[in-house]
Amino acid sequence: MADDGIYSSPVVVGGRIYILDLPGNMYILRASAEHEQIAKIAMGRQTVATPAFTGGRIYLRTAAQLYCIEQRHA
């Protein structure tokens, strides 16, 4: 994980830790004793807000937009 500044609070959901840094990268880590990064997602927009989780959705606010991410079921 880069040291670009983190203003949002980390959130633990479903055994994963979600962290957003200032440049807009979301890091997803396994919530365990070992540091294991599952994914890094580049939002491409500055973020300072803590992501919100409800109803199987993730809400992310950047400096200019609000995103809602939901997994599609086949």
Image (tube, rainbow, N blue to C red):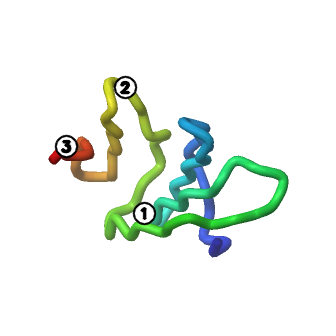
Q: Residue 2 has which mark? A: none
Residue 34 sits above or below residue 16 on the image: below
Q: Quadrant of the N terminus?
A: bottom right
Residue beneath label 3, please? 73
Element assignment for label 1: loop
Circle 3: residue type? His
Residue 17 sits above or below residue 5 on the image: above
**Residue that protrudes farthest toward the left in the picture:** 74
* Mark nearer the viewer, 2 or 3: 3
Inter-mark Cα distance, 1 to 3? 27 Å
Residue beneath label 2, please? 54
Disc 3 crowd rating (10 Å Cα; few below 14, some 14-19, many 20+) is few
Pick whichever of labels 2 and 3 is earlier in the sequence: 2
Circle 1: residue type? Gly
**Residue that protrudes farthest toward the front in the picture:** 74
Q: Residue at x 51, y 55 (%)?
A: 20
* Pointers 1 and 3 in contact (C-beta within 8 Å): no
Element assignment for label 2: strand
How far across and how far down the image is residue 22, in percent? 51, 61
Element assignment for label 3: loop
Residue beneath label 1, please? 24
* Pointers 2 and 3 in contact (C-beta within 8 Å): no
The residue lying toward the viewer, choosing from 66 and 53, is 53
The residue lying toward the viewer, choosing from 62 and 34, is 34
